[in-house]
Image (tube, rainbow, N blue to C red):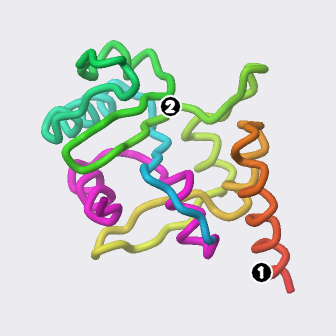
């Protein structure tokens, strides 16, 4: 999977997104293996239409549907949620919020307004990704068992950064 190509295609589609998850962690220096790429998207009608157009061009369908092919649709994106797609480019996860089962969640604008993003350049495209603090906070809010080891690693990177 070519993560850089996916990021560049989203940028060219003028989609408002923040890179999150394992690829973001790796760009911060974490030695994390991941098989998908995760984005937090701005949940607005205009942005969601751009996302849908992009997803349709890469033949996206929802993952984990027991052999059923379920295509993305604008109503789903406008409603928001956490969507896991299989595409011609690889597995892409699109989230309108980062949260947990206790209904604590944060949307795109929270991270932008609180300056929890870094701007980076990938293949001549400037994009936003969660800062190390933003990424640590997102893993803490998600509160998933699978993130515990990653969280320790990210905190160690933060400690190194502060020295």
What residue is at 50 percent from the left and 56 percent from the top? 34
Which residue lies at the image location 35% right of the left edge and 61% below the top edge? 3
Q: Is residue 54 left or right of residue 91?
A: left
Question: Which residue is disc 2 drawn over?
Answer: 96
* Relative to 112, 83 lies left or right: left
Q: Which residues are magenta?
A: 1-30
Residue lying farthest to the front in this orientation? 67
Tell me where residue 154 appears, x and y as whole percent: 74, 64
x, y (%) of residue 78? 39, 19
Q: Write down the quadrant of residue 44 in the picture.
A: top left
Residue assigned mark 1: 161
Q: Is the residue 124 above or below the residue 50 in the image? A: below
Across and down, in percent, residue 129 comes to 52, 59
Q: Which element type, helix, strand or loop, lies under badge 1?
A: helix
16 part of magenta stretch: yes
Which quarter of the picture shows residue 124?
A: bottom left
Spatial distance from mark 1 to mark 2, Cα to Cα?
Answer: 29 Å
Comparing 131 with 141, the one in front is 141
């Amino acid at each position: 999977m070519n993560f850089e190509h996916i990021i560049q295609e989203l940028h060219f589609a003028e989609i408002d997104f923040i890179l999150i998850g394992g690829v973001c962690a790796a760009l911060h220096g974490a030695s994390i293996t991941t098989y998908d790429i995760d984005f937090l998207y701005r949940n607005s009608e205009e942005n969601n239409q751009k996302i849908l157009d992009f997803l349709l061009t890469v033949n996206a369908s929802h993952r984990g549907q027991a052999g059923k092919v379920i295509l993305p649709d604008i109503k789903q994106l406008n409603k928001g949620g956490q969507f896991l797609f299989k595409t011609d480019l690889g597995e892409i996860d699109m989230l309108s919020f980062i949260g947990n089962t206790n209904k604590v969640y944060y949307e795109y604008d929270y991270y932008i307004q609180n300056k929890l993003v870094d701007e980076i350049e990938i293949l001549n495209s400037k994009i936003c990704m969660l800062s190390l603090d933003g990424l640590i906070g997102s893993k803490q809010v998600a509160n998933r068992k699978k993130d515990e080891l990653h969280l320790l690693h990210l905190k160690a990177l933060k400690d190194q950064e502060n020295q």
